[in-house]
Image (cartoon, rainbow, N blue to C red):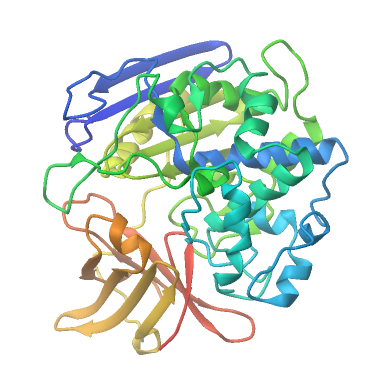
Amino acid sequence: MARKHHVPGAALGILRGDELVQVSAGVLNKATGTSVTDDSVFQIGSITKTWTATLAMQLVDEGRLDLDAPIADVLPDLRLSDPDVTKQVTMRHLLTHTSGIDGDVFTDTGRGDDCVAKYVDRLGEAAQVYPLGVTFSYCNSGFALAGRVIEKITGQTWDAALRERLIDPLGLKHTVTLPEEAILLSAAVGHEAPAGREPLPVSTFLLPRSMGPAGLITASTADVLAFARLHLTRGLGPDGDRLLSEASAVAMTENHADVPNKYVFGDSWGLGWMRFDWDGRQVIGHDGGTRGQFAFLRIVPELGLAVTLLTNGDNAIDLYQELFRELFAEIAGITLPEPVSPPAQPPTVDAARYLGAYERAGSRIEIFAGENGLRVRSIATGQMAEIVPEPVTEHDLLPVGDTLFVSRAEGRQWWTPIVFFSLPTGEPYVQVGVRTYPKVG
C-alpha cells in the first residue's frame, strides 16, 4: 500500500491492551536503500505537541503552572506584537491554538540551549492574526512559546525536561529530539516531490531546533505507542507510577476549542489533542509533518486502542486515509467518516464575497474567478518558499455548501476542505486545513 501511494518507507504500530503489533515496509532513504525495521525512528512532527502539552499538565499537577494565568507571570520580559495579548495570553490559549499569534514562524535561532528563549525574544515580530481567544488557528509558534514557559519553570531546556519527565520514566530507548542523537539510530530521511514526480530525499534533515516544543521529536512506533499508553491509562507509567494526574489526562481530552473547518482533522481540540467523533466513539490523536515526513496517531480510549503510522513521503495522507479506513473497520468495527468531496450536482453559491487575498506568515491564498469557475492559488512566502517543493500551486475550487469548498492537488486522491467564515464582529477569514487566514485584499 505504501508503494501504491509512492511513500518510500512506513512503519505501523498497533497497541491494544498489552498487545503490540508492528509492521514495517520500504526504505529509510532512497539514496541508501536501507530498509525500515521495527526499531527505525521517524520524525513525528506535530505529534510532539501532545508531549509538550503533557509536560505542561505535569506542571499544573505540581501547582507550578496555572492554565488560566497570564504566561507573562512566568515570562515578565515577553513582548508580542499586541500589548494586550502580551498581558493576557495564557497557557490554555497556547495549548488550544486560540492565541491568535501567527503560527507558522520558523525563525532559526541557532543550535544552542538558548534557542527557544531567543525565538521567543523575536516573537514580537509575528502578527496577531485575530483577537485573543475568538477562534482557532493552528499555531506552531504558540507551542514554541509554551515550551519556553516549561523551560523557565523547570530551569531546564525543553529537550532535557522532556527526557527527565517523559522519555526516561516511560523507558523509551528510541525517542530523541536532536540530530546528533537521531544519527545513532536507524533514522528515516524525508522525501518530497512536486506533483506527479517520484519523491527524492530532502536536503534538510530537521526543522530549526527553536521549534522543538512544536515538532522535533523523532521516535519509533513502539515508543509513540508507549506515550499513547500513558494517556490510555490516564497517567500511569509502565511500572504503575503516576506520571500525570487522572484529572489532567481527562482534561486534555475534553473539548476546549471548536474548529471552523471540521472536515480535515478533528471537529474540536483538547489540550494538545485533536478530537474526533468516529462512528459514535470518541477518538483523540494528532498528526505531524516535517520535511518529507508525516506521522499519524489515533487513540480510542473506550477500546484501549492506539494506532500510529510513521512515514517518510509527502503523499502519506492518501496512504493514511486508505490504511486507517481499512484497519479500524477490521480491528475495531469503526467506520471512519467519509472525506468531504464535491457533490455530483454542485450547489449554487454566491461566491463573489469570497474573492480576494488572504494572508498570514509563510502563505498567501488568492481566490479568483477562472474560466470554468472559482480557482485557488496558494503562494508560499518568506522562509516557507524555500522549504516546500512547489512554492506556487493553483487548483479548481469547487463548492460543497455555502461556506464549504474543496480543492485537490494533482495526483492526490483526497480533497482539501476550505471553509470561509467571519468573526462575530464581521471580519472575513478563510480556514485552509486548520490554518486561519484573514482577508487582506
| Residue 302: % across, % down | 63, 28
Q: Quarter holding the C terminus?
A: bottom left
**Nearer to me, 136 or 117:** 117
Q: Quarter holding the N terminus?
A: top left
Q: Residue furthest left?
A: 197
**Nearer to me, 10 or 18:** 10
Q: Which quadrant of the structure image shows residue 320?
A: top left
Residue visible at 48% across and 34% down? 297
Q: Residue furthest right?
A: 63
Residue 4 placement, left or right of 111: left
| Residue 100: % across, % down | 61, 68
Q: Is residue 47 above or below residue 137?
A: above
Q: Is residue 18 above or below residue 389?
A: above
In this view of the protein, can residue 143 be seen by the observer? Answer: no
Residue 333 placement, left or right of 161: left
Q: Which quadrant of the structure image shows residue 153?
A: top right
Q: Which quadrant of the structure image shows residue 422?
A: bottom right
Residue visible at 44% across and 43% down? 288
Residue 234 placement, left or right of 207: right
Residue visible at 32% across and 44% down? 317
Residue visible at 26% across and 73% down? 377
Q: Is residue 90 above or below residue 243?
A: below
Q: Is residue 123 above or below residue 74?
A: below
Question: How many circles with numbers are drawn on the protein?
Answer: 0
Residue 315 placement, left or right of 432: left
**Nearer to me, 105 or 355:** 105
In this view of the protein, can residue 353 be seen by the observer? Answer: yes
| Residue 253: % across, % down | 67, 41
| Residue 29: % across, % down | 23, 29
